Amino acid sequence: MMMGATFCMDAQTTLVNALQLLQQRNYLPALEICNALLAENDNDPSVLGVRSQIHTASGRYDLAQQDADRALSLDNASYRACYAKAELLFYGQKDYKQALQFYEAAIKSNEQMIEAHAGKARAYMGLQNYREALRVIDDAIKTAFRNDPELHFIRGLLNFQRGSHKLAIDDYDKSLSIDPNWNVFQLYLNRGLANEALTRLDLAVEDISRAVQSDPNNAGGYIARGNVLYNLAKYKEAVEDFLKAEVLNPDNSVITYNIGMSYYRGDDLGAACKYFQRSCSQGNSNACRMIVLNCSK
């Protein structure tokens, strides 16, 4: 009995390590841990659930479905299995209504599962029921999870959505104070957007630059900073950011149009028309209009 208990404790500790790697987006080593645990016991619904989460985060939705369904067939009350199914439904199928049911099932099995409360709020956001999403977050923060960075981040998103930009910044600040390494890109990006909404453009550039530094391969950071630089009339710098975004996302007509507009405002009509032509060919009607008005001669 003692040996079995020790094995279970070791397996549980190892599974926590896999979850930590998943949160850090280190999917391959997290997957290797789960595979090793399943080699010892291929009927563990918790491990199958975590592996399903890893597959969902990696975009391998078919594999995620197999693991989640198998985990539920072994134990339909397993909070890990329920949560894994909810994540698959949320991210892989955009079925927010059914995802909500599985998040609630996970909470019913384990009320202390913080991420299930966060998922429940996200599901309500997907259903555009922002009032209920905010209620879920407020209740979770007030009762037991006041020091969870994700809950404060989600509340920040909700406050931003309803136009309470200062409250949104307060929530993002709280997330950063709890864990400065949690989801750095999204935290600084969204705080930057909130500062932009408050017309604190210099602060917005600082925040978004921190986001870009944390994930230089994410086009969203360059687009957001380019927009702020454009509003600051720093058109040359805006062009540089939009060009970097285009390299990462070459078929986005809005990015191409933004490059054209930045050149246009910077009095380089030749370069502007080249990008308006490209954006128009990608289906952007605003770019086509700029060609008619400025590039027909």
Image (spheres, helix red, strand yellow):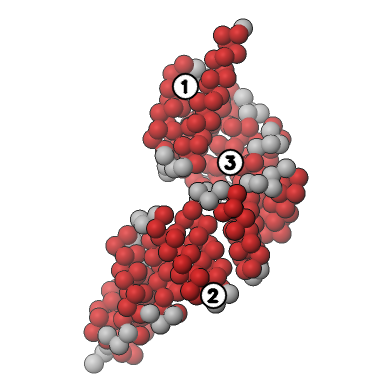
Residue 24 visible, this orientation: yes
Q: Amino acid at mark 2?
A: Arg
- In this rendered view, identify the residue nearer to me: 136 or 285: 136
Residue 67 placed where, x, y %? 49, 30
Q: Which residue is mark 1?
A: 37
| Residue at screen point 31% across, 65% down | 244
Q: Count residues near mark 2 (Cα–Cα under 10 Å), then give few for <14, some for 14-19, many for 20+.
A: some
Residue 223 placed where, x, y %? 40, 67
Q: Amino acid at mark 3?
A: Ala
Quadrant of residue 222 in the image? Answer: bottom left
Cα distance in 3D space between marks 1 and 3: 23 Å
Q: Please, which residue is most extreme toward the top here?
A: 1
Q: Secondary structure at mark 1?
A: helix
With respect to residue 56, does 152 lie above or below?
A: below
Cα distance in 3D space between marks 3 and 2: 38 Å
Q: Which residue is mark 2?
A: 200
Residue 138 placed where, x, y %? 72, 53
Q: Which dot marks residue 86?
A: 3
With respect to residue 62, does 43 lie above or below?
A: above
Q: Secondary structure at mark 2?
A: loop
